[in-house]
Image: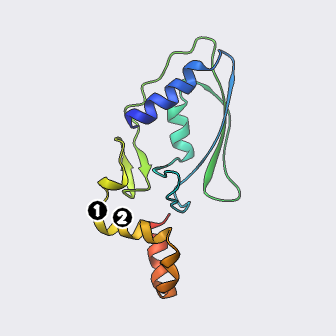
Amino acid sequence: MSLIGDLIINNIKSVLKRGGFIYLTTRSKGFPYHAYPHDYWRYEPSDMVRIFRDFEIIRLETDWEGPGVFLKVRKPMDWRPADLNDIALYSVVLGRRVKELVTLDDTPLVRRLVLYLCNSRLRWLLPGTVVSVLSRRYCS
């Protein structure tokens, strides 16, 4: 997991009182890319199990309306933070799992242009089959 993600998740975990709950919902691979405000990661249920292996998982399920994850966890009374550095998450920007933080600037030019097109009103200029193929390959 990226340094930023590691810091954010472990900060959320550390400020929660022992015995407290976290309710989390997030998107999984297959959910379309969105440019605003920022869109970098997709989380699978298996990622949540690894990220919250130092918590008691009360409920973990996939979103029935779209690619996503719902999670409810409880902080144990004897909590010690898990090391999250070994977790590779699916990067929407690169289209593969990575451990480091990436931005749109790190993306190959063709992928960057297609991601821009996925969120652009100019999509209508392209034939439907082209948009369909690009959307399946790059926009989710």
The answer to whether mark 1 and mark 2 are in CB contact below 8 A is yes
Q: What amino acid type is highlighted by mark number 2? A: Arg
**How far across and down, in percent of the image, does residue 33 sit?**
50, 61
**How far across and down, in percent of the image, does residue 86 sit?**
37, 34
Residue extending farthest bottom: 127
**How far across and down, in percent of the image, does residue 83 sit?**
42, 25
- Graded by Cα atoms within 10 Å as few (under 14), some (14 to 19) or many (20 or more), the crowding at tag 1 reads few
Would you say 54 lies left or right of 117 here? right
Which residue shows up at 42% across the image and 66% down it? 115
Instruction: Tell me, for residue 31, which label it has, or none.
Output: none
Which residue shows up at 65% across the image and 59% down it? 66
Residue 36 versus residue 131 in the image, above or below: above
Label 2: element kind: helix
Q: What amino acid type is highlighted by mark number 1? A: Pro
Would you say 78 lies left or right of 118 here? right
**How far across and down, in percent of the image, does residue 117 sit?**
44, 72
- Graded by Cα atoms within 10 Å as few (under 14), some (14 to 19) or many (20 or more), the crowding at tag 2 reads some
Mark 2 highlights which residue?
Answer: 112
Residue 132 visible here: no
Residue 2 visible here: yes
Label 1: element kind: loop
Residue 120 versus residue 105 in the image, above or below: below
Which residue shows up at 40% across the image and 37% down it? 1
> For residue 6, which quarter of the picture?
top left
Mark 1 highlights which residue?
Answer: 108
Colour scheme in use: rainbow
